[in-house]
Image: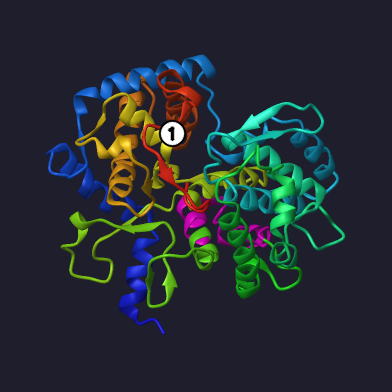
Protein backbone atom coordinates (compact mmCIF):
# COMPACT_ATOMS: atom_id res chain seq x y z
CA UNK A 1 0.00 0.00 0.00
CA UNK A 2 1.38 3.39 -0.97
CA UNK A 3 1.45 6.20 1.55
CA UNK A 4 1.19 9.86 0.59
CA UNK A 5 4.99 10.27 0.61
CA UNK A 6 5.48 7.32 -1.74
CA UNK A 7 2.77 8.63 -4.09
CA UNK A 8 4.45 12.05 -4.22
CA UNK A 9 7.87 10.53 -4.96
CA UNK A 10 6.47 8.28 -7.71
CA UNK A 11 4.58 11.20 -9.27
CA UNK A 12 7.75 13.31 -9.20
CA UNK A 13 9.90 10.61 -10.85
CA UNK A 14 7.23 10.26 -13.54
CA UNK A 15 7.47 13.93 -14.49
CA UNK A 16 9.48 15.72 -17.15
CA UNK A 17 10.54 18.16 -14.42
CA UNK A 18 12.29 15.35 -12.54
CA UNK A 19 14.11 14.31 -15.71
CA UNK A 20 15.49 17.81 -16.20
CA UNK A 21 16.16 18.32 -12.47
CA UNK A 22 18.23 15.17 -12.02
CA UNK A 23 19.95 15.30 -15.41
CA UNK A 24 20.68 18.96 -14.74
CA UNK A 25 22.60 18.09 -11.57
CA UNK A 26 24.86 15.76 -13.54
CA UNK A 27 25.20 18.25 -16.41
CA UNK A 28 26.36 21.01 -14.07
CA UNK A 29 28.92 18.62 -12.58
CA UNK A 30 30.03 17.67 -16.08
CA UNK A 31 30.57 21.31 -17.02
CA UNK A 32 32.71 21.66 -13.88
CA UNK A 33 34.64 18.48 -14.79
CA UNK A 34 33.52 16.84 -11.55
CA UNK A 35 32.08 13.61 -12.97
CA UNK A 36 33.94 10.32 -13.12
CA UNK A 37 33.28 9.34 -16.73
CA UNK A 38 32.52 12.44 -18.86
CA UNK A 39 33.11 16.15 -19.05
CA UNK A 40 31.02 18.75 -20.91
CA UNK A 41 32.76 21.24 -23.18
CA UNK A 42 30.29 24.00 -24.02
CA UNK A 43 32.85 25.63 -26.33
CA UNK A 44 31.83 22.91 -28.81
CA UNK A 45 28.14 23.83 -28.66
CA UNK A 46 28.18 26.14 -31.69
CA UNK A 47 29.99 23.49 -33.76
CA UNK A 48 27.31 20.93 -32.91
CA UNK A 49 24.48 23.37 -33.68
CA UNK A 50 26.03 24.25 -37.05
CA UNK A 51 26.33 20.57 -37.97
CA UNK A 52 22.69 19.92 -37.04
CA UNK A 53 21.52 22.98 -39.01
CA UNK A 54 23.39 21.65 -42.04
CA UNK A 55 21.52 18.34 -41.72
CA UNK A 56 18.20 20.16 -41.22
CA UNK A 57 18.70 22.24 -44.37
CA UNK A 58 19.57 19.12 -46.40
CA UNK A 59 16.44 17.24 -45.32
CA UNK A 60 14.02 20.15 -44.74
CA UNK A 61 15.20 23.13 -46.83
CA UNK A 62 11.93 24.99 -46.14
CA UNK A 63 12.32 24.33 -42.38
CA UNK A 64 8.86 22.71 -42.34
CA UNK A 65 9.89 19.92 -40.00
CA UNK A 66 7.43 17.29 -38.73
CA UNK A 67 7.47 15.85 -35.21
CA UNK A 68 10.13 13.30 -34.28
CA UNK A 69 7.88 10.26 -34.02
CA UNK A 70 7.35 6.68 -35.09
CA UNK A 71 5.31 7.86 -38.09
CA UNK A 72 8.47 9.07 -39.84
CA UNK A 73 9.86 5.52 -39.76
CA UNK A 74 6.66 3.96 -41.08
CA UNK A 75 6.90 6.21 -44.14
CA UNK A 76 9.99 4.48 -45.55
CA UNK A 77 7.97 1.36 -46.47
CA UNK A 78 4.91 0.81 -48.67
CA UNK A 79 2.52 -0.67 -46.08
CA UNK A 80 1.51 2.66 -44.49
CA UNK A 81 -0.30 3.79 -47.65
CA UNK A 82 -2.21 0.48 -47.68
CA UNK A 83 -3.08 0.90 -44.00
CA UNK A 84 -4.30 4.45 -44.57
CA UNK A 85 -6.61 3.20 -47.35
CA UNK A 86 -8.09 0.61 -45.03
CA UNK A 87 -8.45 3.05 -42.13
CA UNK A 88 -10.16 5.61 -44.37
CA UNK A 89 -13.34 3.54 -44.08
CA UNK A 90 -13.46 4.07 -40.32
CA UNK A 91 -14.83 6.95 -38.27
CA UNK A 92 -12.20 9.51 -37.17
CA UNK A 93 -12.36 8.12 -33.62
CA UNK A 94 -11.93 4.50 -34.70
CA UNK A 95 -9.08 5.51 -37.01
CA UNK A 96 -7.28 7.25 -34.13
CA UNK A 97 -7.79 4.20 -31.91
CA UNK A 98 -6.25 1.91 -34.55
CA UNK A 99 -3.29 4.29 -34.91
CA UNK A 100 -2.79 4.26 -31.14
CA UNK A 101 -2.81 0.44 -31.17
CA UNK A 102 -0.19 0.38 -33.90
CA UNK A 103 2.13 3.00 -32.52
CA UNK A 104 2.09 1.74 -28.91
CA UNK A 105 3.11 -1.75 -29.99
CA UNK A 106 5.64 -0.47 -32.53
CA UNK A 107 7.36 1.90 -30.12
CA UNK A 108 7.63 -0.80 -27.48
CA UNK A 109 9.37 -2.95 -30.10
CA UNK A 110 11.75 -0.12 -31.01
CA UNK A 111 14.70 -0.84 -28.73
CA UNK A 112 18.03 -1.19 -30.56
CA UNK A 113 18.08 -3.95 -33.18
CA UNK A 114 21.85 -4.42 -33.34
CA UNK A 115 24.16 -3.80 -36.29
CA UNK A 116 23.40 -7.01 -38.24
CA UNK A 117 19.61 -7.41 -38.37
CA UNK A 118 17.60 -6.32 -41.44
CA UNK A 119 13.98 -6.56 -42.53
CA UNK A 120 13.13 -7.24 -46.19
CA UNK A 121 9.78 -5.76 -47.12
CA UNK A 122 7.87 -8.54 -48.95
CA UNK A 123 6.22 -6.27 -51.54
CA UNK A 124 9.45 -4.63 -52.68
CA UNK A 125 12.27 -6.69 -51.12
CA UNK A 126 13.77 -3.40 -49.99
CA UNK A 127 15.96 -3.96 -46.93
CA UNK A 128 15.56 -1.77 -43.84
CA UNK A 129 17.65 -1.90 -40.68
CA UNK A 130 17.59 -0.47 -37.17
CA UNK A 131 14.60 1.75 -36.28
CA UNK A 132 13.16 1.87 -39.81
CA UNK A 133 13.37 -1.90 -40.11
CA UNK A 134 11.67 -2.43 -36.75
CA UNK A 135 8.96 0.07 -37.74
CA UNK A 136 8.22 -1.52 -41.13
CA UNK A 137 8.26 -5.02 -39.62
CA UNK A 138 5.87 -4.06 -36.81
CA UNK A 139 3.57 -2.28 -39.27
CA UNK A 140 3.45 -5.39 -41.47
CA UNK A 141 2.67 -7.55 -38.42
CA UNK A 142 -0.08 -5.15 -37.38
CA UNK A 143 -1.66 -5.28 -40.84
CA UNK A 144 -1.53 -9.08 -40.71
CA UNK A 145 -3.40 -9.11 -37.38
CA UNK A 146 -0.61 -10.69 -35.33
CA UNK A 147 -1.44 -8.51 -32.31
CA UNK A 148 -5.22 -9.00 -32.54
CA UNK A 149 -7.49 -11.77 -31.26
CA UNK A 150 -10.49 -9.97 -32.77
CA UNK A 151 -12.19 -10.44 -36.12
CA UNK A 152 -10.92 -6.92 -36.83
CA UNK A 153 -7.25 -7.51 -37.62
CA UNK A 154 -6.32 -3.83 -37.57
CA UNK A 155 -5.94 -3.57 -33.84
CA UNK A 156 -3.78 -4.72 -30.95
CA UNK A 157 -5.93 -5.94 -28.09
CA UNK A 158 -5.21 -7.39 -24.66
CA UNK A 159 -5.87 -11.02 -25.53
CA UNK A 160 -3.92 -10.86 -28.79
CA UNK A 161 -0.90 -9.41 -26.97
CA UNK A 162 -1.07 -11.89 -24.09
CA UNK A 163 -1.18 -14.85 -26.50
CA UNK A 164 1.66 -13.60 -28.69
CA UNK A 165 4.40 -16.24 -29.08
CA UNK A 166 8.12 -15.89 -29.57
CA UNK A 167 7.87 -17.86 -32.81
CA UNK A 168 5.25 -15.48 -34.22
CA UNK A 169 7.35 -12.46 -33.30
CA UNK A 170 10.53 -14.07 -34.66
CA UNK A 171 8.78 -14.87 -37.94
CA UNK A 172 7.43 -11.33 -38.16
CA UNK A 173 10.93 -9.93 -37.71
CA UNK A 174 12.41 -12.48 -40.17
CA UNK A 175 14.91 -13.61 -37.51
CA UNK A 176 17.37 -16.36 -38.40
CA UNK A 177 20.91 -17.41 -37.49
CA UNK A 178 22.11 -15.14 -40.29
CA UNK A 179 19.71 -12.33 -39.32
CA UNK A 180 19.78 -12.08 -35.50
CA UNK A 181 17.79 -9.44 -33.61
CA UNK A 182 18.97 -8.19 -30.22
CA UNK A 183 16.65 -8.75 -27.25
CA UNK A 184 13.73 -10.73 -28.74
CA UNK A 185 12.67 -12.34 -25.41
CA UNK A 186 12.65 -8.92 -23.73
CA UNK A 187 10.45 -7.49 -26.49
CA UNK A 188 8.02 -10.39 -26.25
CA UNK A 189 7.68 -10.08 -22.48
CA UNK A 190 7.12 -6.33 -22.81
CA UNK A 191 4.17 -6.89 -25.17
CA UNK A 192 2.71 -9.65 -23.01
CA UNK A 193 2.92 -7.42 -19.95
CA UNK A 194 1.26 -4.68 -22.00
CA UNK A 195 -1.65 -7.06 -22.64
CA UNK A 196 -2.05 -7.73 -18.93
CA UNK A 197 -1.71 -4.07 -17.97
CA UNK A 198 -4.46 -3.13 -20.41
CA UNK A 199 -6.81 -5.58 -18.68
CA UNK A 200 -5.85 -4.24 -15.25
CA UNK A 201 -6.58 -0.58 -16.13
CA UNK A 202 -10.10 -0.45 -17.60
CA UNK A 203 -10.41 3.22 -16.64
CA UNK A 204 -7.74 3.98 -19.25
CA UNK A 205 -8.12 1.24 -21.85
CA UNK A 206 -11.80 0.31 -21.66
CA UNK A 207 -13.76 -2.71 -20.46
CA UNK A 208 -15.05 -4.12 -23.72
CA UNK A 209 -12.16 -5.44 -25.82
CA UNK A 210 -9.48 -3.45 -23.91
CA UNK A 211 -6.71 -2.13 -26.18
CA UNK A 212 -4.14 0.69 -26.30
CA UNK A 213 -6.55 2.65 -28.48
CA UNK A 214 -8.80 3.02 -25.44
CA UNK A 215 -6.47 5.84 -24.39
CA UNK A 216 -7.95 8.01 -27.14
CA UNK A 217 -11.28 8.29 -25.31
CA UNK A 218 -9.51 8.95 -22.01
CA UNK A 219 -7.37 11.74 -23.48
CA UNK A 220 -10.28 13.34 -25.32
CA UNK A 221 -12.02 13.66 -21.96
CA UNK A 222 -8.90 15.39 -20.58
CA UNK A 223 -8.93 18.08 -23.27
CA UNK A 224 -10.18 21.59 -22.49
CA UNK A 225 -11.57 23.80 -25.25
CA UNK A 226 -9.93 21.59 -27.83
CA UNK A 227 -6.50 21.83 -26.19
CA UNK A 228 -4.45 19.06 -24.60
CA UNK A 229 -1.08 19.48 -22.88
CA UNK A 230 1.72 17.22 -24.12
CA UNK A 231 2.62 16.47 -20.51
CA UNK A 232 -0.92 15.16 -19.90
CA UNK A 233 -0.32 12.59 -22.63
CA UNK A 234 3.08 11.77 -21.13
CA UNK A 235 1.75 11.28 -17.60
CA UNK A 236 -1.08 9.12 -18.97
CA UNK A 237 1.43 6.93 -20.80
CA UNK A 238 3.51 6.53 -17.63
CA UNK A 239 0.44 5.77 -15.52
CA UNK A 240 -1.10 3.38 -18.01
CA UNK A 241 2.04 1.49 -18.99
CA UNK A 242 3.98 1.65 -15.73
CA UNK A 243 3.43 -1.99 -14.84
CA UNK A 244 5.04 -3.30 -18.03
CA UNK A 245 8.51 -2.25 -16.90
CA UNK A 246 10.86 -4.11 -14.60
CA UNK A 247 13.64 -2.66 -12.46
CA UNK A 248 13.72 -0.17 -9.60
CA UNK A 249 10.54 0.12 -7.52
CA UNK A 250 9.08 2.37 -4.85
CA UNK A 251 6.35 0.81 -2.68
CA UNK A 252 6.00 -2.03 -5.19
CA UNK A 253 5.49 0.33 -8.15
CA UNK A 254 7.74 -0.13 -11.17
CA UNK A 255 9.44 3.13 -12.07
CA UNK A 256 10.50 2.14 -15.58
CA UNK A 257 13.43 3.90 -17.25
CA UNK A 258 14.89 5.19 -13.96
CA UNK A 259 18.44 4.42 -12.84
CA UNK A 260 20.91 5.04 -10.01
CA UNK A 261 23.84 7.44 -10.05
CA UNK A 262 26.03 8.09 -7.02
CA UNK A 263 26.21 11.85 -7.64
CA UNK A 264 22.46 12.12 -6.94
CA UNK A 265 22.65 10.16 -3.68
CA UNK A 266 22.66 13.16 -1.35
CA UNK A 267 18.90 13.78 -1.47
CA UNK A 268 17.04 12.85 1.71
CA UNK A 269 13.98 11.12 0.28
CA UNK A 270 12.79 7.93 -1.43
CA UNK A 271 14.04 9.11 -4.81
CA UNK A 272 17.60 9.54 -3.52
CA UNK A 273 20.14 8.55 -6.14
CA UNK A 274 17.59 8.09 -8.91
CA UNK A 275 17.78 9.60 -12.41
CA UNK A 276 14.63 9.23 -14.55
CA UNK A 277 14.72 9.26 -18.37
CA UNK A 278 11.53 7.56 -19.66
CA UNK A 279 12.96 7.48 -23.18
CA UNK A 280 10.51 5.01 -24.74
CA UNK A 281 7.58 6.63 -22.93
CA UNK A 282 8.46 10.08 -24.27
CA UNK A 283 9.11 8.67 -27.75
CA UNK A 284 5.68 7.06 -27.50
CA UNK A 285 4.13 10.31 -26.32
CA UNK A 286 5.58 12.20 -29.28
CA UNK A 287 4.21 9.45 -31.56
CA UNK A 288 0.68 9.63 -30.08
CA UNK A 289 0.36 13.37 -30.62
CA UNK A 290 -0.22 13.18 -34.37
CA UNK A 291 -3.35 10.97 -34.24
CA UNK A 292 -4.71 13.34 -31.58
CA UNK A 293 -4.02 16.33 -33.82
CA UNK A 294 -5.88 14.55 -36.64
CA UNK A 295 -8.91 14.52 -34.32
CA UNK A 296 -8.68 18.31 -34.14
CA UNK A 297 -6.92 18.68 -30.78
CA UNK A 298 -4.30 21.40 -30.33
CA UNK A 299 -1.28 20.06 -28.43
CA UNK A 300 0.18 22.60 -26.01
CA UNK A 301 3.39 22.73 -23.96
CA UNK A 302 5.49 20.61 -26.32
CA UNK A 303 8.78 21.75 -24.80
CA UNK A 304 7.77 20.58 -21.33
CA UNK A 305 8.96 17.17 -22.51
CA UNK A 306 12.66 16.49 -22.95
CA UNK A 307 14.96 15.30 -25.68
CA UNK A 308 15.43 11.55 -25.99
CA UNK A 309 18.50 10.11 -24.22
CA UNK A 310 19.37 7.42 -26.74
CA UNK A 311 22.47 6.53 -28.68
CA UNK A 312 21.91 8.74 -31.77
CA UNK A 313 21.43 11.97 -29.83
CA UNK A 314 24.06 10.96 -27.28
CA UNK A 315 26.40 9.81 -30.02
CA UNK A 316 26.15 13.18 -31.76
CA UNK A 317 27.25 14.95 -28.59
CA UNK A 318 30.19 12.58 -28.13
CA UNK A 319 31.30 12.44 -31.75
CA UNK A 320 31.43 16.23 -32.05
CA UNK A 321 33.14 16.78 -28.69
CA UNK A 322 30.37 18.44 -26.68
CA UNK A 323 30.65 15.46 -24.33
CA UNK A 324 34.10 13.96 -23.78
CA UNK A 325 34.99 10.61 -22.19
CA UNK A 326 37.53 10.87 -19.36
CA UNK A 327 39.00 7.35 -19.56
CA UNK A 328 39.45 4.61 -22.14
CA UNK A 329 36.95 2.17 -20.60
CA UNK A 330 34.08 4.34 -21.85
CA UNK A 331 34.75 3.59 -25.51
CA UNK A 332 36.60 0.28 -25.30
CA UNK A 333 34.10 -1.89 -23.42
CA UNK A 334 30.40 -2.72 -23.62
CA UNK A 335 28.21 -1.40 -20.82
CA UNK A 336 24.92 -2.47 -19.29
CA UNK A 337 22.08 0.06 -19.28
CA UNK A 338 22.33 0.43 -15.47
CA UNK A 339 26.05 1.25 -15.60
CA UNK A 340 26.94 4.70 -14.24
CA UNK A 341 28.75 5.33 -17.53
CA UNK A 342 25.49 4.93 -19.47
CA UNK A 343 23.39 6.80 -16.89
CA UNK A 344 25.87 9.66 -16.96
CA UNK A 345 25.99 9.76 -20.78
CA UNK A 346 22.21 9.76 -21.05
CA UNK A 347 21.76 12.48 -18.42
CA UNK A 348 24.28 14.76 -20.11
CA UNK A 349 22.56 14.13 -23.44
CA UNK A 350 19.17 15.29 -22.14
CA UNK A 351 20.43 18.71 -21.08
CA UNK A 352 22.80 19.02 -24.05
CA UNK A 353 19.77 18.71 -26.34
CA UNK A 354 18.14 21.69 -24.62
CA UNK A 355 21.30 23.76 -25.19
CA UNK A 356 21.59 22.60 -28.80
CA UNK A 357 17.93 23.46 -29.49
CA UNK A 358 18.30 26.96 -28.01
CA UNK A 359 21.45 27.59 -30.06
CA UNK A 360 19.81 26.38 -33.28
CA UNK A 361 16.77 28.59 -32.69
CA UNK A 362 19.00 31.59 -32.14
CA UNK A 363 20.93 30.91 -35.34
CA UNK A 364 17.76 30.36 -37.38
CA UNK A 365 15.94 33.26 -35.69
CA UNK A 366 13.05 31.05 -34.69
CA UNK A 367 11.30 30.72 -31.34
CA UNK A 368 10.28 27.63 -29.39
CA UNK A 369 6.76 27.67 -30.83
CA UNK A 370 8.10 27.73 -34.39
CA UNK A 371 10.80 25.14 -33.69
CA UNK A 372 9.91 23.05 -30.62
CA UNK A 373 12.33 20.45 -29.33
CA UNK A 374 10.37 17.61 -30.95
CA UNK A 375 11.15 19.16 -34.36
CA UNK A 376 14.80 19.80 -33.50
CA UNK A 377 15.10 16.08 -32.71
CA UNK A 378 13.59 15.15 -36.07
CA UNK A 379 15.33 17.74 -38.20
CA UNK A 380 17.71 17.40 -36.41
CA UNK A 381 19.86 15.84 -33.79
CA UNK A 382 18.75 12.23 -34.36
CA UNK A 383 19.54 12.37 -38.08
CA UNK A 384 22.79 14.21 -37.42
CA UNK A 385 23.81 11.57 -34.86
CA UNK A 386 23.24 8.84 -37.41
CA UNK A 387 25.11 10.78 -40.12
CA UNK A 388 28.23 11.47 -38.06
CA UNK A 389 28.27 7.86 -36.82
CA UNK A 390 28.20 6.58 -40.42
CA UNK A 391 31.05 8.96 -41.30
CA UNK A 392 33.25 7.93 -38.37
CA UNK A 393 32.62 4.18 -37.99
CA UNK A 394 31.82 1.18 -40.16
CA UNK A 395 28.14 0.15 -40.00
CA UNK A 396 27.34 3.50 -38.37
CA UNK A 397 27.62 2.03 -34.88
CA UNK A 398 27.29 4.40 -31.91
CA UNK A 399 30.50 5.51 -30.16
CA UNK A 400 29.58 3.61 -26.98
CA UNK A 401 28.44 0.00 -27.07
CA UNK A 402 25.47 -0.96 -24.90
CA UNK A 403 24.23 -4.39 -23.82
CA UNK A 404 20.50 -4.05 -24.51
CA UNK A 405 17.75 -6.44 -23.43
CA UNK A 406 15.35 -4.92 -25.95
CA UNK A 407 13.39 -2.83 -23.45
CA UNK A 408 15.30 0.45 -22.96
CA UNK A 409 16.98 1.77 -26.11
Give x and y (percent) for residue 289.
Answer: 57, 46
Magenta segment:
212-236
146 is within the stretch colored magenta = no
Q: Residue at x 58, y 60 (%)?
A: 190
Q: Name the residue carrying label 1.
A: 312
Q: Is residue 277 left or right of residue 131?
A: left
In the foreground, 326 or 149: 326
- Residue 337, above or below 356: below
Query: Hey, which residue is sitting farthest bottom in the picture?
Result: 1
Residue at x 66%, y 61% (from the top left corner)? 217
Q: Nearer the viewer, residue 45 or 168?
A: 168
Residue 257 point in image, percent of width and height:
42, 56
Question: Residue 305: x, y in percent?
Answer: 41, 47
Q: Which residue is at the front of the view, 94 or 111?
A: 111
Q: Is residue 215 magenta?
A: yes
Quarter of the figure with residue 110 = top right
User: Is 1 situated above or below 129?
Assistant: below
Height in image: 87 above or below 130? Answer: below
Relative side of 308 to 320, left or right? right
Which image quarter holds the N terminus?
A: bottom left
Amino acid sequence: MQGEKEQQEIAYLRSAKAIRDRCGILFDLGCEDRLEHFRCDLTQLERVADYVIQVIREDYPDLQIPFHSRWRHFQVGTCLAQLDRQLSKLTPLAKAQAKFDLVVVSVLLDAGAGAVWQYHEPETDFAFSRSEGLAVASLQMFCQGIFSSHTDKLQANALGLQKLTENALADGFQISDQNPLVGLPGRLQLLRRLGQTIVDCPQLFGNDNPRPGGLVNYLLAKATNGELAAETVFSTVLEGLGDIWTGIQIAGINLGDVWLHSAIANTQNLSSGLVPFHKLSQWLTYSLLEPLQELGLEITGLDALTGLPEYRNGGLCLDLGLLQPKHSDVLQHRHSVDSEIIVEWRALTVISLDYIADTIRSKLRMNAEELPLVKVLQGGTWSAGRKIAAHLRSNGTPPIQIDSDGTVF
